[in-house]
Amino acid sequence: MEDKSGSGTAIPTAEENRGRTALREIKEFLKELLDIHDDTDRETTLETVKRDISFKGHNAWILIFSIFVASIGLNVSSTAVVIGAMLISPLMGPIVGIGFSVAINDIDTLKRSLVNLGVMVFLSVLTAYLYFLISPIKEETPELVARTYPTILDVLIAIFGGSALIIAKTKKGAIASVIMGVAIATALMPPLCTVGYGLAIANWEYAGGALYLFTINSIFIALSTFLMAKLLRFPLVKYVNSKRRRNTARLASLVAVLVMIPSIILFVNLLREQVFVSKTKEFVHEVVNYPGAEVVKFEQDYKTKIIEIYLIGRPVPQDQIDQWVQAITQVPNLEDVVLEVHQGSDQTSEMATRLSTEVRAGILEDLYVKNQQLVENKDARIQLLEQELLKYRSAGIPFESISKEVRINYSGVQEMSYANSLVTNFSQIDTIPTFNVKWSPKLKGSARKTQMQQLEQWLQVRLSLDTLVVRSVD
């Protein structure tokens, strides 16, 4: 921009001034929208966090009963019941206390939180163990199996749930911490119940995996609390002894580092594993396609980097398989995997023995569903043909014998004729047997009407027809 005044300083134009004003207004708007420092009640938050740490009296019984409810929900694979248990569960107190105490260098609160966390875990696992021990239903359910190993989704729930809870606790005014704690309970209650289930059925792999999941989720909830407390600048606990203050601060910092570094490594590993699984599914669904062949199962192992695909139907040429093997090396995050394709016609692969019971059951289920659909379609076809047959059944009416019986039973009938009438309501056409009857002049009024009704009823029974018409001809 040229300096018109000769002073050497550029004079901003009107457009630049408007742009700076708009940018300043946007910054102020975003600060007002997202800033939570001014609306944070630090004293009340400290009191609330410390109060929720303890697991005595009411809290202990609430925890026990909520674990019972959650165990029932997992046992019958009812998500609604599990959510109902989360609404009354006081699980988040000690874990939030751990993260908060580390953030403010409060060693006494940290010790209380650790002790009460141990009490919480013990009560929860014991309650779930007793329930599953006496429960007559000990089958694995999808809800239970899903809590035997951590995934990236569990970690994300713990991170964002913990962040939401601590922000809700710090806000001035009341936000129902029980409702906000549902996200925390989502990450904590089902794993603890699954630990009890694993112990009850003596499946140490289930119990260990679920305990590992609970530990990981607890660490990330505490880590989220720690970071939020630091972000909101909660004051550090002051100690009279300066040496103790320094040692406490160093210990808290050491604990934070020891927790954060493994947590970050674990998060990255879980994220990579989840990406590996997602990319594998995408590759199988989009690339592994061949006319006449169908993928009945595929397995992926993140540790060994082996992907196994099982096919049935038309044999796939080796050239096509080689193209798949080459194609998967071009997929990001799948460059170093080994792709193994097993076909039903390949006897060397021993596919018949390698297919799991689950896959065989799935194939049988698919066949059953398809056969069931065929049977239903045939039943509908048979019903339609029977309806059509009823229309033409009257063509074989023994009119001669019927007329003789009518003559004997109804002396008032002088003449009778029979024909099929085509009737339509403009949406379908029906064939209705129709009898035209000429009565004796001596039979009049109510007597004729009565005999007409009796004749119609008798013909329906005699001919096994649901629908027919008897008309009087003068």
Image (cartoon, rainbow, N blue to C red):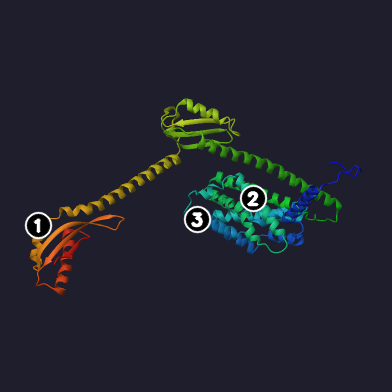
Q: Is residue 269 above or below residue 160?
A: above
Residue nearest the viewer, comparing 126 with 381: 381
Q: Residues within 10 Å of mark 1 (few under 14, many from 20)?
A: few
| Horizontal and vertical percent position of residue 378 | 31, 47
Sequence-earlier tag: 2 or 3: 3
Sequence-earlier tag: 3 or 1: 3
Which numbered disc, 2 or 1, marks the residue closer to the eye? 1
The kind of residue tagged 3 is: Ile
Q: Quadrant of residue 430?
A: bottom left
Q: Secondary structure at mark 1?
A: helix
Which numbered disc, 3 or 1, marks the residue closer to the eye? 1
Which numbered disc, 2 or 3, marks the residue closer to the eye? 2
Mark 2 touches mark 1? (CB < 8 Å): no
Q: Secondary structure at mark 2?
A: helix
Query: Residue at (74%, 47%) from the top-left corner?
Result: 256
Q: Is residue 229 visible?
A: no
Q: Is residue 183 left or right of residue 260?
A: left
Alpha carbon of mark 2 to alpha carbon of mark 1: how far? 88 Å
Residue with the mark numbered 2: 158
Residue with the mark numbered 3: 134
Sequence-earlier tag: 2 or 1: 2
Alpha carbon of mark 2 to alpha carbon of mark 3: how far? 31 Å
Residue with the mark numbered 1: 400
Quadrant where the N terminus sits is top right
Instruction: Name the residue furthest right.
Output: 7
Q: Is residue 385 left or right of residue 114?
A: left
Q: Which mark is residue 229?
A: none
Q: Is residue 93 visible?
A: yes
Mark 2 touches mark 3? (CB < 8 Å): no
The kind of residue tagged 2 is: Ala
Residue nearest the viewer, comparing 458 with 57: 458
